[in-house]
Image (spheres, grey):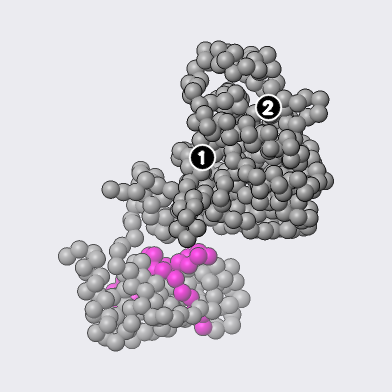
Amino acid sequence: MGVESDRLKKIRNIIEQGVNPYPSKAKRTHSCQDVDSDFNQIAKTKKCVTLAGRLVLLRVHGKACFANLEDFSGRFQFFLNQDDLGKKDYNFFIDNIDIGDFLQIKGRLFQTKKGENTLRIENYSLLSKSLLPLPEKWHGLSNIETRFRQRYLDLISNPKVRKIFTVRSKIIKLIREFFDQRHFLEVETPILQTLAGGAAAKPFVTHHQALNTELYLRIAPELYLKRLIIGGIERVYEIARCFRNEGIDRTHNPEFTQIEFYQAYADYNDLMILTEKLIVFLLKNLGFPDLKAEYQGKVIDFNPPYPRLDFRQAIIKETKIDIDKYKKIEDLILQVKPLGIKIDKTWGRGKILDELYKEFVLSKIIQPTFIINHPLELSPLAKKFPDRPDYVERFQLLVYGMEMCNAFSELNDPLDQELRFEDQKKLREKGDEEAQSGGKDFVTALKYGMPPTAGEGIGIDRLVNILTNTQNIREVILFPILKPKK
């Protein structure tokens, strides 16, 4: 008889004895962690304690047994025997309860002869009967996708995974605290948008039946958040779910979380300082007093200030190519091709420069470093340098070969913005699916006036990767996108 059919037989037996295997209500007075950490104080009172959780370990010794109950806070041992429960209730437990079942247990605390903190059970209730057994050798699974497809089993079997998502939740709370303390207003902007703007990425497309129009899942909240700056909200942020129709790898998932924030009367230099303060705030509150975190065998030192490396100088250092000498795309291609970069015919000059940067600069940088002053073609929403018009006031923070954030002094000249959107339109017409969309509505909003403003986006998933020492972005997303099973 299979395990599931055996447990179905037990359910029928439970029901025949007048017990509901799936009651709607439970209660508990303490968590497992509560009774473990305050054991002596609670035990002195000799009061009854009620716990609720999943049975994860059972050792039967004739007319008595030891077992472990687990809830979100941890595990706690309990003891039950026939003398305390009576023959009927004890046999019901032995005959019908399995590892994986949820129980409510009530009793008093004591210590075993070996000094183990234990709850001696006076009565118990079945809260939920499990039909499938928990995996016995879950940690030995070689197929990592199985863990992601059945995350619930991963969480049951691996306390480290639960800790990752507890840390993730704390990071998001701390980010909110940091910006709330500085009088930023948290807002929500549309996920369904009529134009996919705010970043260079291929969007997901859907269709709205009632309006008979195409809509896009947002690739970034930027254009809406800047409308709020125009509307007079001088400091604003959103913790945003974003969607990009791109490949899946160690640092990319089509659905991801980022914080975007905008501050009026600031420039990109101000945000570099603010970013350093945010990271220091996070690490100090997450238990890194020396501001150093181990990641993939390297010690990452987050003590500010972080080095600032000019984009052009970084390319020169790693490839010996001075991009200022090759303004025409044809000339740039001749320089880049010998380096092994395969250039698509739809690429513009900016896309080639970006690939050059990702291939030869990004992977070399381990310690926190600001890459600053990007080429204009890469940054259609950023403000130019007055004395260096081919470059913009932009930075990215790099850690261990990953882009952690992207920020710039925002372009607030509506006429310049209009021209740049036209250039992006030409790239889309040429076939570049990642070229940005802007739209007349945003330009119209700019025409009403936007003060000097700086904005930034930080990838929360990658940040959690670094601070939990996990390599793959799917380790820090509860339910990452996976190819459906056939």
Work out whether 334 lies above or below 156.
above
Magenta stretch secondary structure, dominant: strand
Callout 1 amino acid: Lys
Work out whether 134 lies above or below 335.
below
Q: Nearer the viewer, residue 146 or 115?
A: 146
Residue 127 falls in which quadrant of the image?
bottom left
Q: Position of residue 225 (x, y in %)?
A: 68, 51
> How busy is the neighbourhood of tag 1: few (under 14 within 10 Å), some, or many (20 plus)?
some
Mark 1, residue position:
202
- Relative placement, left or right, of 155 versus 464 is left
- The stretch of residues the image draws in magenta is 48-75
Q: Position of residue 41 (x, y in %)?
A: 61, 76
SS at mark 2 in the image = loop
SS at mark 1 in the image = loop
Magenta stretch: includes residue 234: no
Residue at position x 45%, y 66% in the image: 70
Callout 2 amino acid: Pro
Q: Position of residue 15 (x, y in %)?
A: 27, 82
The answer for how far apart the CA atoms under marks 1 and 2 are is: 21 Å
Q: Image quadrant for the N terminus? A: bottom left
- Residue 172 appears anywhere in the view: no
Work out whether 416 lies above or below 150.
above
